Image (cartoon, rainbow, N blue to C red):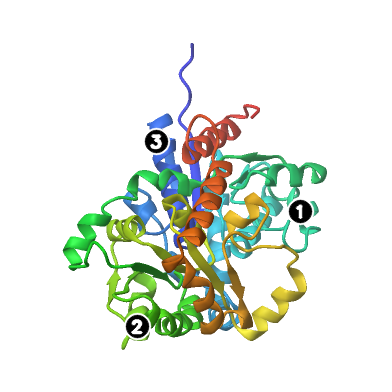
Amino acid sequence: MMPKRPLTIMVSAGEPSGDALGAGLISALRRLRPDVKIVGVGGPAMRAEGLVSFFDIAEIAVMGISEVLPKLRTIFRRIKQVAAFALRVKPDVIVLIDSGDFHHRVARRIKAADPSLKVVKYVSPQVWASRPGRAAGMKDYLDHLLCLLPFEPAFYEPYGLPATFVGHPALERAGLIEGGNALRRRLDISPDAKVLCVLPGSRRIEVTKLLPVFKETVARIAGDVPGLVCLLPTVRNVEARVRAGASDWPVPLHILSDTDARFAAFDTADAAIAASGTVTTELALAGVPMVVAYKVGAVTAAIWKRLVNVPHITIANLVIGRRAVPEFIQEQATPDALAAALKPLLTDGQAIEAQKSALAEAVGKLGTKGNGPSRRAAEAVLKIAEGVPL
């Protein structure tokens, strides 16, 4: 039997959540094919897996019109550079992870210049939530989609775009959610104290919009939850903004900036208040009851409201088809509304157990039988690179 030829795979991520996905994918690819050559663009997690990135993705990890506009020139320059890199290297497959506005432009440029290159998008854009007509054009510049949600492949069937459900990568982090008791001891938090995880997001616009609201929310429930302690995990690119915005916090607060402490916080938290995003799936995995909020700039929100047609923004709610996790968007995300939804999750046993049961149901639907999501994604990427049917 002839040995398999070495493969070159390009992987590109544009923000922290995509960087985490990319790191898992790279690790799985190397376990399956130790001789694989991986090139592209990523952040610290992907660099830790050995990727040499040719620019810092912090330059393009922005959202909302107020953040995007000042960086438009940089963003478009990087789009051209990523596409040019792919066209120069001609890898066996190109995997573009999340960051739809950025990577769909990259994909179009690549396919326009060289249709023979295979382009895979890892994480489906939420076209099922807004402007579903966009799906029809995606088959012109994407060869395959790797989907995180179980209902997504069926959505793309009528459009002729091949898609594979690989499962949600947050499920792979189950083993990391530990160390809660040790964290309490290290921070001198009583074993009986109620702990609230505060998660205002990993983007600057999210922190700017949500942290002041979360702070006022905590102030409103503090009197009803004696001894309440808050843990605020954050990431490097917004840590300074978080620390500035969290001054004069109404109850004892610990800001955590390392990954291990983040998962330990989930392990010990009694409840959470979080920005919509990947973190809500991690909280679901940890069985932490939560309230979810989201706010963007006024112009972005006005456009979003005209385009989005989906009943829920939290993944757990989407996959079980009902609103088990309270959600508050834009003007709904007030301290009073958030406090009213959050207080029972710290004080009412029936409300706590009801949401925990719903979260367990959601986690069950986000998985796949057999190998984990990164392994399934890596297997699909290798088959596409080698021209093997999925």
Residue 42: percent from left, percent from top: 43, 57
Q: Tell which circle, 3 or 1, labels the residue nearer the N-terminal end.
A: 3
| Any part of residue 318 in sight | yes
- Image quadrant containing the C terminus: top right
Residue 142: percent from left, percent from top: 68, 48
Q: Nearer the viewer, residue 216 or 43?
A: 216
- The residue sitting at 45% across, 57% down in the picture is 283
| Circle 3 residue | 30
User: Cα distance, mark 3 to mark 1?
Assistant: 32 Å
Residue 36: percent from left, percent from top: 42, 35
Q: Secondary structure at mark 3?
A: helix
| Any part of residue 115 in sight | no
| Circle 1 residue | 135
User: Cα distance, mark 1 to mark 2?
Assistant: 41 Å
Residue 102: percent from left, percent from top: 59, 64
Q: In the rendered structure, which amino acid carries the disc numbered 1?
A: Ala
User: Cα distance, mark 3 to mark 2?
Assistant: 41 Å
| Circle 2 residue | 246
Image disc number at residue 351: none
Q: Nearer the viewer, residue 178 or 58?
A: 178
Front of the two marks 3 and 1: 1
Q: 10 Å neighbourhood of mark 2: few (<14), some, or many (≥20)?
A: some
Q: Nearer the viewer, residue 51 or 207?
A: 207
Q: Secondary structure at mark 1?
A: helix
Q: Tell which circle, 3 or 2, labels the residue nearer the N-terminal end.
A: 3
Q: Is residue 164 left or right of residue 280?
A: right
Asked if the residue at tag 2 contacts the one at tag 1, i.e. Cβ–Cβ closer than 8 Å, the answer is no
